[in-house]
Image (cartoon, grey):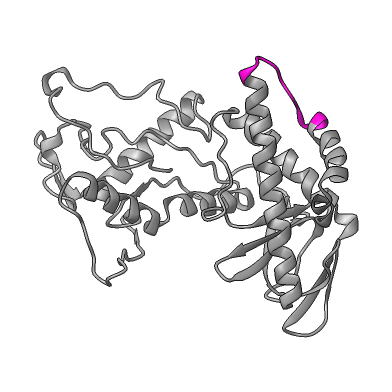
Amino acid sequence: MLTGRRYRLDLTPVQAAFAEQVGGICRSVWNTALEQRREYRRRGAFIGHATQCAQLAEAKRDFPWLADAPSQVLQQTLKDLEQAVKAHGTWKVRWRSVRRWKPSFRFPDAKQIVMERISRRWGRVKLPKFGWVRLRWSRPLGGTLRSATVSRDGRHWFVSFLVEDGQATPEAHPGPAVGVDRGVVVAATTSDGDFHDRPFITSKGTVEQPASGGAQKSGLNRAILDKGWYGLELAVTSASRYTGTKIIKVPAAYTSQTCSACKAVDAASRESQARFACTSCGHREHADVNAAKNIKAAGHAVSGRGDLGATRSVKRQPPRPRARQHAAPAARGIPVL
């Protein structure tokens, strides 16, 4: 099974400057190649990875600074662009901005990478054109090295290794199913009644929920980022490979308005962020736990039909009751089972 190992690098000032230079060259190659693809599309033509790699080799004669970066790193940049275009389309792939993009580049050939431990706390890795680079030995590599990605996060540089750890995914998880509701007040709530949270603290050190308009939308976005919804999804998906757990994402619509006991749907049942009181049967429960139970039930239904798997679909989204079409669905994100 392929997995990742991340270590903090201890670059010398010369190595740090070179890493910034290589990152800048990769950014320039990405942006130039993306613009070339778009220009070809405007003319109704097409250019692919192989042609761009050949043109990159020719460009090094006219622009010697391209040769400062390792060749495999630049070729991998073009390969990553190819994959991004196939996945999202030429016009939806983003430019790499100097201010917003974090320098990152990958060495795909494991034969040119050497890693070894030199003491209890330190190790080192040999990378093309960098030479030996020290790293903090925070854990064993634990597998066969496949590739290495160098990136900067803030003022520190890191290296992430892709390794084959030799493990296989179990056929099925022995434990019971559980529904997980993601929120901006409580990060994750399970159908078993467990609450997993991380605080949302603004730069002023106070908790906010802006009142309306653009400020409200901005505050919601910040809260979602702080709660780490995407990080939670990645962590759960990664862990599921080792446990055999099946991850099913279900549409969020009506999960916060549906009674987990009688299945009646009414926006009025959601009395507040934390309280749910069914207007039909009188069932009362914490609103997030109630939503998580609905997510669990929806996941069972999806698993039985087999039309979603691990991806989101709205093909069989629950219909809104005709008598209550005026009730607007609550925005709760994409729950995960």
Side (left or right) of 305 relative to 35:
left
Q: Who's the residue at 27% across and 21% down the image?
A: 319
- Kindly tell me whether residue 54 is visible in this rendering: yes
Asked if residue 60 lies left or right of residue 13, the reply is: right
In the depicted structure, whether residue 35 falls above or below residue 9: above
Q: Residue at x 65, y 16 (%)?
A: 43
| Magenta span of residues | 42-51
Report the label total: 0
Which x, y percent locates residue 211? 15, 51
Give the image quarter of residue 150: bottom right
State the image coordinates of residue 333 (x, y, percent, origin top left).
Answer: 34, 42
Who is closer to the viewer here, 322 or 194?
322
The residue sitting at 57% across, 71% down in the picture is: 155
Q: Quadrant of residue 120?
A: bottom right
Q: Give the prevailing secondary structure in the magenta stretch.
A: loop
Q: Is residue 271 left or right of residue 83?
A: left
| Vertical arrangement, residue 285 with respect to residue 49, above or below | below
Residue 113 among magenta residues: no
